Image (cartoon, grey):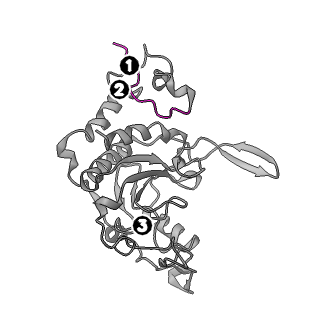
Amino acid sequence: MITADTIVPDSTIPQTFNRYAYVENNPVNHRDSNGHCQDRRQCEAWISLGATPSQKSKPRITSREDWGARQPGNNTLCGVQRVGCMEVPDNEGFFDPVSNPAGYAPYSQLHEDETLSSILFEVVIHHGGNSMNPITSPSSIQYEHQTKRGWHDIGYHFMVDGNGQIYEGRDIGVRGSHVSGGNTGRIGVLLMGDFEPGAALSVGSISIDLIDLNGDHEPSFAQVGSTVQLLTWLDSVYGIDSVVGHNDINHTECPGTSCLIYIPYFDNIVNQ
C-alpha cells in the first residue's frame, strides 16, 4: 500500500505539497505505512518511543553536577593547571527591566505569579554547526558560551549527544540564551553535531564552498529517539504547544538541512 505523507511541513514552500517528497519521489522502493519517513523501521521505532504512556516518565538525564558544570556566572579563563586565571566579562549579565531586559533571569523573577507550565510553550531545536561533532562534551559547550561569548551560563536547557545521552543545561526555571530576541518561554534543546552540508569561505564578495570535515551526518537513531523521549516528558510536565527549529525564529541555517526533516515529527509528538 502506498501512503502519502500526512504532514505538510511548510505551506509557504510549494515542494512541501508534494506528498511523496519524504520518499524522494520513489514510493515504490521506499515504503512507510505511517507516511512519515523513508526508513519505515527507524521512523516507526522512534515515533513509538513518544507514543506510549510509559514513555512519559522522565528520561535518564545527566545532571549538571554529574557532567561537571560550572556555576552560573563563573566566567573564568585559566591557563595550564589553572595558572593565571582571569575573569571574562559577563556580557549577558543579570536581568534588569530597564538596563538589561534580556539578562539572565529566573522565571520566578520575570513572572512572579505564573507557573512554568503557563510560561513554557515551545521547544526550539538546535545543532552545533561546523565546530561540533556528535560527542562534543557539554563542558566544552559551556566553556564556549561562558568564557568565549561571555554569557552567564550555558545557553541551552538540554543537550543530546550522538549516543542518545541527554544532558541538563541551563536550569529550566531560568530563561535560556539560544535564540535572538525571543527566549522567554522557549526551551532550548541542542542536538550535538553538524547537520548542515558544506562549509563556506567568504573572501570579499566571493563565497567558496568547502568540504565539511565533520561529515554532515543526520542525527543518529539514538539521538532522535532520546529527543522524542525528552519532548514527550516535557510535554507531559509543562504542556508544550509546539516544537520548531532555530531557523523558524531567526535567520540561520540552524538546526541544519539534515535535521529539518525531523522538526515536523518532533512537533507532532507534542500535539498527539
State which tag comes first along the sequence, 2 or 3: 2
Q: Residue at image x 40%, y 20%?
A: 4
**Residue 21 sits above or below residue 182 on the image:** above
Q: Is residue 6 magenta?
A: yes
Q: Given the image, on which type of amino acid does mark 2 rest?
A: Arg
Which residue type does callout 1 highlight? Arg
Question: Can you say whether 75 is above or below 14 in the image?
Answer: below
Q: Position of residue 84 (x, y in %)?
A: 57, 87
**Residue matched to label 2:** 40
* 67 relative to 97 in the view: left or right: left
**Main SS class of the magenta portion in the image:** loop
Start-end of magenta stretch: 1-12
Q: Check the image and report above or below for 44 versus 125.
A: above
Q: How many marks?
A: 3
- Distance of mark 2 from mark 3, alpha carbons? 37 Å
Q: Closer to the N terminus: mark 1 or mark 3?
A: 1
Instruction: Classify the position of the C terminus by image quarter.
Output: top left
Residue 222 position in % (x across, y down): 35, 44
Q: Residue 43: horizontal and vertical position, in percent?
A: 35, 32
Q: Which residue is mark 3?
A: 175
Residue picked out by circle 1: 31
